[in-house]
Structure formats: structure tokens, C-alpha cells
Amino acid sequence: MTTTPSATAAAPSALPAEQPVDPALWWRQAVVYQVYPRSFADADGDGTGDLAGVTSRVPHLERLGVDAVWLSPFYPSALADGGYDVDDYRDVDPRLGTLEDFDRMVAALHAAGIRLIVDIVPNHSSDRHAWFRAALAAGPGSPERERYVFRRGLGADGAQPPTDWLSIFGGPSWEPVGDGDWYLHNFAPEQPDWNWDHPDVRADFRRTLRFWADRGVDGFRIDVAHFLTKDLTGVLPTQAELEATQDLTDGAHPFNDRDDVHDVYREWRAVFDEYDPPRMAVAEAWVPAHRRPAYASAEGLGQAFNFDLLVAEFDAAAFRRVVEENLLLAADAGSSSTWVLSNHDVVRHASRYGLPAGTPRIPWLLSQGTDPAPDLVRGVRRARAATAFVLALPGSTYVYQGEELGLPEVADLPDAVLQDPTWLRSRGADKGRDGCRVPLPWTRDGDSLGFGPEGGRPAHLPQPASFAELAVDVQEADPASTLAFYREALARRAGLQTVEELEFLDAPEGVVAFRRPGGWVCVTNFTTAPVPLPAGRVVLSSSGRPPGEGLTDVPAETTVWLTPVEPADAVATGAGGATGR
Ligand code: GLC
């Protein structure tokens, strides 16, 4: 029986019973938990997280209720870019374990009903990859150099780079190798770009996909999916021309979002479809919205991230616009939408939402997170509201490790411990992404707060004292904790999940309300004052108040989920008339 006073007698149809999901389509509305393995759990005590650590924490993931794990790179790597500089695509970094540890992890995840997505980094290898070493050794003009993007330097002695292009991490995009040749690296110098015109490169990546699919991997997250193919023939534009005149919408840029990149993904689709169920893939493609469906098409990768909520303010109109646009784009592609509030590349959303609107990231990080000081209570309140909002949407939600604990960005890491190439390459002009990669606190006490075993080496990025009270064991004991809220939300969501449709409901300014088929209603109050609660039975409130306990309003900066009231409840509460918005 509900105690919600605004219950209506005109109850919508009952919620559908749990619908069987076609095993080939499990990913369409999945909750996927991103593990950044070096910062998740350290089983061997060397200060760096590892695969045995992931295995040991499968019960946490199971209890959380996620459908899948996306594992960021765990391959052998010198860590010039947190593992996105891959030495060998078909092995495990010895500091993280072995292939047998990988198999044990897959078995443990699968036994818990959790699927696994691994990260594939196809735009660049590391400079320690066997083929790059061979290219360096073989010299200019050799077939070995053809697998990467080598060009002669300009000037009589080849001492000038082929172009003045700038890399994404800062500094030039070309690196000289001492014999008149230069190689292209769109990211760090330790990340040489592959030549995707080369059949060896294409064949080797298909082999890598099969290697992991054969080991039981269920899908792939494709790093920088919008790069890969290049056309560097003819006269190359300057950096200024690239920025000013290169059209990023016509698919003919020298290396960014080219139309021919989709030939690669069509080949990969054939590989994915060799498996039953077919392996899924999701593209990390930072492209204009109208270019995204191509990545998400069923002939290509099948799904693409949209990062629109990473840059949206906590604002009703902004959130609604993002949802409307992305549901259309996903429908265009025949895919489902993705929703992302945090990942390993951005400031954690509990901190973002505690800052005044429009706070620029770089100066804030350079002020060690003090100017302005975030209101973390508010940040977490809004973060929980935003999480409940996205979890109610059609499509899949990607959760970044630690957001279930409401972890803030660690903005005051000392310079000496910073690892991110954006910090090093920008010579301190950008503090980089280490603040969201600090190891998780599992226990309130103990060395590295349970990240590693007692007596082990300190965590590779130091945890702030404030992490102790946010530890998993502290939050497990508190029914009002963010962890308890995530568990409740994911469990509810699993029971309410329905076909991929949504209908917006009328709502006052500053409020977004929508209904899913079967009558699951989500109302988010983005304002700082309570608003009246619509009709229905409250089954979740992001403000942590237990459902059904006399809620009369949607509190400030809170999301509430409601389900239809059964007629018996309506009679019992004496409520009459439809009061739904
Ligand atoms: C992607 C990854 C990021 C990495 C970059 C280069 O954007 O998410 O962490 O630095 O690719 O591989």
C-alpha cells in the first residue's frame, strides 16, 4: 500500500513483467561499469591495481547489479598514457597479471552474470611494439616503416617536420628518428599512429579481436574510433589551415572522422558476427552529432558514446535537449543511446556539479581545486539526481568506477606524482586526468584504504584522507549512502526496464519528467526548491529518503521514480482523480 498522498485512481496499465532480452542485444540497455584496472584493486600489493584485484572484487560488482564491465587497457605498456600506449595487443601487462589471471577474471565475471568489454586501441600502438621497433631498425624506405606513418623531414637534411601539426596532448605531432624520417603521433610521442592502408595492420587487428573474443570477451570499446584511416597524399595543410579550413563534416579530413574509417568497421563487423551471440562494440568517437550514427550503425561498431552530458550543466533544459537529440541519433543508427556522466578522462561529476556553472576545468585544476572551492554536498546530491535520471532513460548507462561511492575529483595531487601526458606535454599548463584515476577506497582503515593488502606498497596515486569516510565498507553500513542508492537504483531499474521508448510529460520550469512504457515515471527537479510530486508510487528517490515515507514533494535537485498505483492503493488512500502532469 502506498502512502503517497497524490495517488491516483486512474492507474495506468500495470508494468510489464520482466521481458526476456535477446542474448544478441544484451548491450542495448545495459549498465556497464568501467574499470580502470591500475586504480581498482591491487591484489599483489605492488601499488598498482591488477586483474586478480578485479576478480577479488567481482562480489562488489555483482552486489551493485551491473550488467557488464568495460576494462580499460591492461596490456603490456610503459604507461606513457595510462596503458593507452600498447606494447602487445594480445597479452597482459606482467604488473597486472597473466593471461591465466585474465581467464580467471572472465570466469568469475561470467559466473556472476556480468559480461566483459575490453578496450581496443587501434589508432596507435606504443613505441615499444615489436613492429615499431622493427620499423626503427629497418630504416628509411623499408617495408617495416610502411606499417606506421613515416615521412621524410623537410629541408636538405630532413631536419624540419613534414608539417607543423600539433598533437592532442600538446607539442608537435611528428617525431624525428634521427635518419631524416619522422613519424606521426596524434597523441604522445610514445604512441605512433598506425598506417591503416596497410593490410598487415588490418589483419593484425582482426586477429586481436578474435584472440579476445575466443577467450570469452563479450564486446569491445574502441578507442579514438574516429581516427585510424588517413590520407596524407598531396600537399598537406598547415595546422592553421587544418583548424580554419578543414571541414570536419565532409569525411575528407586528412586523419579525423574520414568516411573510409567505416570500411575498417565493416570488416570488424564480419568478425563480431562470427560469434554467437555476436560480439558488441562501442565507439569512442568525438565527432559532430550528425556524424555519430555511422559509428553506431549495425553494419559498423553498433553503438557510439555520446559525451554530451559530460559538458552539459546541471540544468533541466540542457539535459532534456541532450536526451531528445541523442534518442533521435540512436534511432537513426538503429542503435540504442549511451549515457555517460564520468569516465577516466574527465573531472568526476560529483565535483563538476559542486562548482558554479561554467567553471573552466584547467584553471580550476591548476588552483588545486580551490578556486572556486566546490560544494561537495551539493555536488553529490546533483550527481545522484543525474544518475537516477540517466538510469531511467532508454539505452545503456556507462558508470565509471568510484562514482557509486560519490568520489570527488582529487584536484590537489602534488605535481611530483602526476603521470598524465597532458600534464607533462603541456609543461604544466594542463594538470591532466590523474585526479579521477586515484585508487578506490575499499575500507575505512588500513594501508591504501583496502586498495592493496596490508604492508603493500602505497597506491600509485595517493588517496586523500577524505576517501576513508567514502570507503565501500563505510557506505555498506549506511542505508542513506551513495553506494546504497546505486544498488537500489540498479535493482529497481532491472525490474522496471522496458522497451526503448520514452514520452516526456508536462512539467514546471526546471523540472524534466518522462514516462517509459508500462508507466515507469522519472521526475528530476533541477531547481533549488521542492516541487509537487506527481501521481504514483515512489520507488526511488535520489535524495536518499526511503521510498514511501511520506514524500509529498520532489525535493530540490532530486530525481524520483514512480510506478503506477494499483487500484487497491488508490482506494486505501482515498485519493481520487488523475493528477498526473
Ligand atoms: C582515448 C582514451 C584516453 C587516451 C586517448 C589516447 O581518448 O580515453 O584515455 O589518452 O584515447 O589513446
Image (spheres, rainbow, N blue to C red):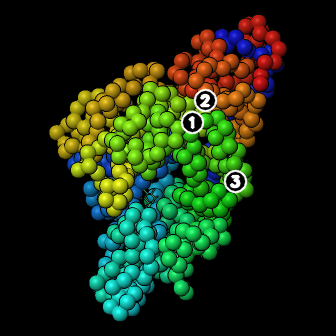
CB within 8 Å, label 3 to label 2: no
Pinpoint residue 567: horizontal percent, then vertical percent.
78, 15
Residue at 59% from the left image edge and 60% from the top image edge: 287
Cα separation between marks 1 and 3 = 22 Å
Q: Is mark 1 within 8 Å of ligand 1?
A: no
Task: Name which of mark 3 and mark 2 comes first in the sequence.
Answer: 3
In the rendering, at what x and y percent does residue 369 appear? 36, 39
> What residue is at 53 percent from the left and 38 percent from the top?
357
Left of 323 or right of it: where is 378? left
| Residue position for label 2 | 526
Q: Nearer the viewer, mark 1 or mark 3?
A: 1
For marks 3 and 2, give the CA distance.
Answer: 25 Å
Q: Nearer the viewer, residue 433 or 374?
A: 374
Q: Residue at x 43, y 82 (%)?
A: 162
Q: Quadrant of the N terminus?
A: top right
Q: Amino acid at mark 1?
A: Phe
